[in-house]
């Protein structure tokens, strides 16, 4: 049989496979989430996320240096305070855990790029993402709290802020307060398309942020919807978001694709704690080859349209890129 077109010609060796690769990745697009806690002498593994840790401030610089040495250039910081109240006032306190962590990080490991999660759930006594009105989150009353928190992060040294609360209008409120205080250069990475997902379970243990009643379905998105996600992303861009995010990643690659086609800003995807925990658990049981699955799942997220990947496997992926296993 005579065949002129043979797709296998472009698969014959490593060199040509990499030459014609459609999806290309770079270490600079990886963001590594980290958890900082009050106290001293703490480097405590998170039970539901083996290999991920809570760090007290005295242990934090060494962890940052380890990330930088692995080839990670950007980190996303989450703080777990020792004091919580109804409105989450520790979130914007000058001596808050994130504010202290930022000042220390900028001093000790200035070469990293510091992004902060802006939300109230870790800081409120009820675990919801804003101020309450009865048993519901009061959207408009929460906006000034988020804006104040974002400003405090930037004043402490944040290079970028990432609001994750899913309140309507939060990007505009944050952009306004940053600009009014001379921080026009600070980008906003909006958690624009954040679904009410069961994949967040391990994170809620890690961040001590599970709601004490009800759920977050009145402000996080229904996972049946795609058009709604596009609407959310476009609204955030209109309000001043410089990047938008889809969260979770692996079960929402159709959404990543649709959003990437709809917006004119970079699109990030957050491979969340449940995705990490499932891969890690299967690997620890010997059911999968961890490195291969990590590489394949990351490539699939980029292939779907992500420009930036937030992942607990950022250090490993940076190494695999250096080794030529992915990239």
Image: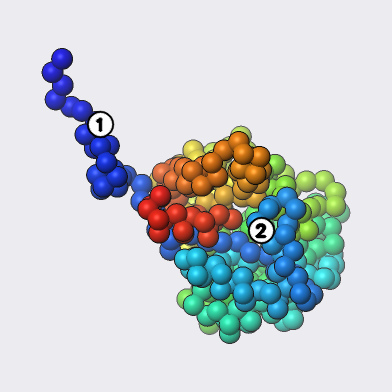
Location of residue 256 with respect to 148 vertically, above or below:
above
Label 2 Cα crowd, 10 Å radius (few <14 / some 14-19 / many 20+): some
Label 1 Cα crowd, 10 Å radius (few <14 / some 14-19 / many 20+): few
Residue extending farthest to the top is 1
Work out how far the residue at label 1 is from the one at label 2, CA to CA, in angstroms: 41 Å
Q: Is residue 303 left or right of residue 297?
A: left
User: Closer to the camera, 323 or 294?
Assistant: 323
Q: Secondary structure at mark 1?
A: helix
Q: Which residue is mark 2?
A: 52
Question: Residue 35 occupies which quadrant of the picture?
Answer: bottom right
Which residue occupies 50% across, 70% down? 69
Which residue occupies 72% across, 47% down? 201
Q: Is residue 129 visible?
A: no
User: x, y percentage for residue 143?
Assistant: 68, 65
Q: Is residue 310 left or right of residue 210?
A: left
| Total residue callouts | 2
Q: Earlier in the sequence, mark 1 or mark 2?
A: 1
Q: Is residue 42 left or right of residue 107?
A: right
The circle on residue 142 is none
User: Closer to the camera, 103 or 176?
Assistant: 103
Q: Which residue is mark 1?
A: 8
User: Closer to the camera, 25 or 136?
Assistant: 25
Q: Is residue 68 visible?
A: yes
Which residue occupies 83% across, 67% down? 84
User: x, y percentage for residue 317?
Assistant: 48, 55
User: x, y percentage for residue 302?
Assistant: 43, 48
């Amino acid at each position: 049989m005579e065949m002129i077109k043979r797709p296998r010609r472009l698969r014959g060796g490593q060199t040509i496979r990499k030459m014609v690769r459609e999806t290309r990745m770079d270490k600079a697009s990886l963001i590594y989430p980290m958890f900082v806690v009050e106290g001293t002498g703490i480097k405590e593994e998170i039970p539901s996320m083996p290999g991920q840790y809570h760090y007290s401030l005295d242990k934090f610089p060494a962890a940052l240096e380890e990330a930088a040495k692995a080839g990670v250039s950007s980190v996303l910081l989450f703080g777990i305070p020792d004091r919580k109240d109804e409105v989450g006032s520790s979130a914007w306190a000058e001596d808050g855990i994130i504010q202290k962590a930022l000042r220390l990080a900028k001093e000790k490991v200035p070469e990293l790029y510091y992004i902060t999660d802006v939300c109230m759930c870790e800081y409120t006594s009820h675990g919801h993402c804003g101020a309450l009105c009865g048993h519901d989150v009061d959207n408009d009353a929460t906006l000034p709290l988020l804006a104040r928190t974002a400003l405090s992060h930037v004043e402490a040294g944040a290079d970028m802020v990432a609001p994750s609360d899913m309140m309507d209008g939060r990007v505009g409120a944050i952009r306004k307060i940053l600009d009014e205080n001379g921080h026009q250069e600070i980008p906003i990475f909006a958690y624009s398309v954040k679904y009410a997902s069961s994949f967040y379970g391990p994170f809620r243990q890690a961040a001590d942020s599970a709601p004490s009643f009800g759920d977050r379905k009145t402000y996080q998105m229904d996972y049946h919807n795609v058009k709604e996600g596009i609407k959310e992303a476009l609204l955030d861009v209109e309000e001043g978001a410089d990047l938008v995010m889809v969260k979770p990643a692996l079960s929402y690659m159709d959404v990543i694709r649709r959003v990437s086609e709809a917006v004119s800003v970079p699109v990030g995807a957050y491979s969340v704690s449940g995705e990490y925990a499932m891969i890690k658990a299967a690997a620890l049981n010997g059911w999968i080859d961890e490195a291969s699955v990590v590489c394949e799942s990351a490539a699939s997220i980029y292939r779907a349209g992500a420009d930036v990947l937030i992942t607990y496997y950022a250090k490993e992926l940076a190494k695999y890129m250096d080794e030529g296993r992915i990239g």
